[in-house]
Image: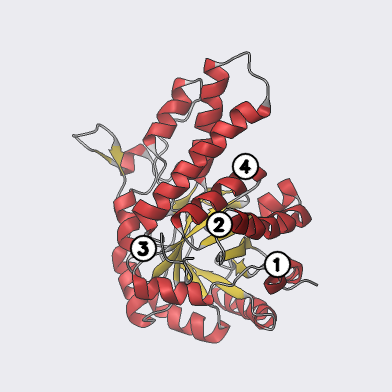
């Protein structure tokens, strides 16, 4: 058993309290490999932002949980080497689906876990979340629960359509489970195909599709019931159209990939939403850069020559999110 504190990681408690007070949100970026992790850490250090490194069940299966744990430990040291003396890095399990998985992460040094019982009947979600909270809190590990179902596909998490969170249930859920934060459903969804074109309208200025607005009334309802309680938004990639266009220009085939407009996320970040999950956007940034190298330099076969540009493109994207969307830059408790 290793505690996250030994690894130099932090949990989400103070980070979220500060973010709510300060009207910004902490970026939660998923990672599966070294280049992604380097890009995330570099972006966080250079913008002086706290950051949440997220590992999904799929990532654990892909990269191996032991290796990911040591990579996160390495991330703290890497941040220090880059000149950040007091990094605030959380290692978080994204969409834990069982008590055993969450327990295994707590025991391996994760500082935060999500238990996603949102697909279960309400009482079962409460019971499962409480069981995880009771275990995790013994070790200071923070727990994210989920109420309401998000549409879309993310690794092994999949639902046909979303069910908005019922604000009436949130007090009961938060009180009975003791969870530290709550993922809610207000119309964001997983993946790069968040909306069907027929749900959108065309922006006359850009010719691009604009999706229906998020259900801010549901968020307002939740904040009214639980003032100051940390809220999490999943499925919050914006699907940058320039990345989609680059991918398609160089032989890709992404049709009608549509995300959440950044203005909506900016608005959410100013509220009790204090963690915003972004995964698909970095996948797109990585793929666009790799496709461009493959298409323009077909003789290239040194992986560093295409993974390097992919890493640079992801770093640019992460910095943009931190500075222009979430507002978490210069928010480390100790900036020196
Ligand atoms: Zn999610």
Residue 226 percent location from the top left of the image? 39, 81
Q: Earlier in the sequence, mark 1 or mark 3?
A: 1
Quadrant position of residue 117: bottom right
Q: Is residue 219 above or below residue 297?
A: below
Outermost residue to the bottom: 175
Mark before the other along the chain sequence, 4 or 3: 4
**Dot 4 lies on which element?**
helix
Residue 269, labelled with which disc? Answer: 3
Q: Is residue 314 above or below residue 20?
A: above
As drawn, the residue found furthest toward the right would be: 1
From the top left corner, tell me how far across and down residue 37 is, in percent: 61, 49
Determine which residue is flagged by label 2. 83
Q: Nearer the viewer, mark 1 or mark 3?
A: 1
Q: CA distance from mark 4 to mark 3?
A: 27 Å
The one of 287 and 39 positioned closer to us in this rendering: 39
Picture residue at 69% right of the left edge, 60% below the top:
73
Instruction: Determine if the C-beta at disc 4 is less than 8 A from ligand 1.
Output: no
Answer with mark 4 or mark 1, whichever residue precedes in sequence.
Answer: 1
Please tell me which residue is depicted at 62% across the width and 42% down the height of the picture. 35
Callout 1 environment at 10 Å: few (<14), some (14 to 19), or many (20+)?
some
Residue 167 drawn at (x, y percent): 38, 75
| Visible residue check, residue 166 | no
Q: Which residue is mark 1?
A: 7
> 188 or 60: which is nearer to us?
60
Q: CA distance from mark 2 to mark 1?
A: 18 Å
């Amino acid at each position: 058993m290793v505690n996250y504190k030994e690894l130099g990681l932090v949990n989400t408690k103070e980070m979220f309290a500060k973010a709510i007070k300060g009207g910004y949100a902490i970026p939660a970026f998923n990672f599966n490999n070294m280049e992604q992790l380097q890009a995330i850490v570099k972006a966080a250090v250079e913008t002086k932002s706290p950051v949440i490194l997220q590992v999904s069940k799929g990532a654990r299966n892909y990269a191996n949980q032991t290796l990911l744990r040591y990579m996160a430990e390495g991330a703290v040291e890497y941040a220090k080497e880059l000149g950040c003396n007091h990094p605030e890095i959380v290692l978080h399990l994204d969409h834990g689906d069982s008590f055993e998985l969450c327990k295994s992460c707590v025991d391996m040094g994760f500082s935060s876990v999500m238990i996603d019982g949102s697909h279960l009947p309400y009482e079962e979600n409460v019971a499962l979340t409480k069981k995880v909270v009771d275990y995790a809190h013994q070790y200071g590990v923070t727990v994210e629960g989920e109420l309401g179902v998000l549409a879309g596909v993310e690794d092994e998490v999949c639902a046909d359509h979303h069910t908005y969170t019922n604000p009436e249930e949130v007090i009961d859920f938060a009180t009975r489970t003791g969870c530290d934060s709550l993922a809610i459903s207000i119309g964001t969804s997983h993946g790069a195909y968040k909306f069907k074109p027929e749900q959108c309208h065309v922006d006359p200025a850009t010719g691009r599709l604009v999706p229906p607005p998020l259900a801010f009334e549901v968020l307002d309802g939740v904040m009214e019931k639980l003032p100051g309680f940390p809220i999490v938004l999943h499925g919050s990639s914006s699907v940058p159209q320039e990345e989609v266009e680059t991918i398609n220009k160089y032989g890709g085939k992404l049709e009608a990939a549509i995300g959440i407009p950044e203005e909506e996320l900016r608005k959410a970040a100013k509220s009790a939403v204090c963690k915003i999950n972004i995964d698909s956007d970095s996948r797109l940034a990585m793929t666009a850069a790799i496709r461009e190298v493959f298409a323009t330099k077909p003789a290239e076969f040194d992986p560093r020559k295409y993974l390097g540009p992919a890493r640079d493109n992801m770093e640019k994207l992460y910095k943009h999110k931190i500075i222009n969307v979430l507002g978490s830059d210069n928010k480390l408790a100790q900036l020196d």
